Amino acid sequence: MDMNQNKNPLNELLINIVIPVLILNKGAKYLGENGTTWALVIATAIPAGYALLDFIKFKKINFVSVLGFISILLTGGLGYFKFEGKWFAYKEALIPGIIGLGVLISAFTKKPLIRILMFNDSILKTDMINEALEEKNTKVPFENHLKLSTIFFAASFFFSAILNYILAMRIFTPISKSLPEIERTQILNEQIAKMTWQGYIVILLPSLLILFAILWHLFSGVKKYTGYDFNSVLRDQKKS
């Protein structure tokens, strides 16, 4: 059993979105003279610190989590050094783009990512599936099916990268240089806050729809090449 499955989704939402957004929008007035800068530092430190503690606790490196941690630090760094506009757009597109590239590369190896994520003993009755593939002599087309599913999965990250970039370009508009530095920093903090919550809403929904389509494609292949339906090959989690 994956230890990470015990995480509370509400805690994840609070720590990674709600609390940082509140601090970025409202925290400056409670944090003294340099409140806008401190608000940025604290808002990015909270999810970054949570990710680090999570790694220390579970002693497990997760590639996506590492990139998420780097993304948070980049956001804080860009904001602290007063980078604006297109730099945030580049950053928002870079992270899912890197993940997508990694997933795409895995499709052309012996272990496509979909095989690692889904085709394993903790989720599926792999012995049963392998026996059926051997019996029906469909092992090669099934491997090609896993490869294609992985390519589709990579495409979902590239789609997210494009949406991230478009959304970031709309949110991170240029800030007038004539404004006082404190006011400019507060505007930037508000832009970061807006990107934080809107990114999850605008990008998460279509990404989930794409993911469901990929899973449908994956399990339709299992049925096609083994003859078993989804329920037949799904391992009973209560017994595992």
Image (spheres, grey):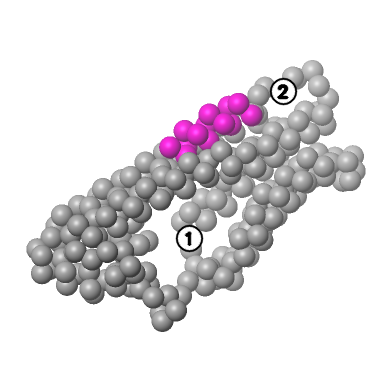
Q: Residue at x 41, y 79 (%)?
A: 240
What stretch of residues is rendered in magenta?
159-171
Up the image or down, 15 lies above or below 25; here it is below
Q: Can see residue 30?
A: yes
**How far across and how far down the image is residue 72, in percent?**
61, 47
Is 223 on the left-hand or right-hand side of 166?
Answer: left
Q: Which residue type does callout 1 highlight?
A: Asn
The residue singled out by tag 2 in the image is 175
Residue that label 1 marks: 62
What x and y, as percent, mark residue 231? Answer: 33, 67
Quarter residue 118 falls in:
bottom left
Q: With respect to residue 126, does 37 lie above or below?
A: above
Residue at 19 percent of width and 64 percent of height = 227
Q: Is residue 196 left or right of residue 5?
A: right
Q: Are marks 2 and 1 in contact (CB under 8 Å)?
A: no
Front residue of 156/238: it is: 238
Residue at 76% x, 30% y is 187
Q: Residues within 10 Å of mark 2 (few under 14, many from 20)?
A: some
Q: Is residue 163 magenta?
A: yes
Residue that sits furthest to the bottom in the current view: 239
Counting from the top left corner in percent of width and height, residue 66 is at 52, 55
Q: Quadrant of residue 220?
A: bottom left
The secondary structure type at the circle numbered 2 is loop
Q: Is residue 35 left or right of residue 113?
A: right
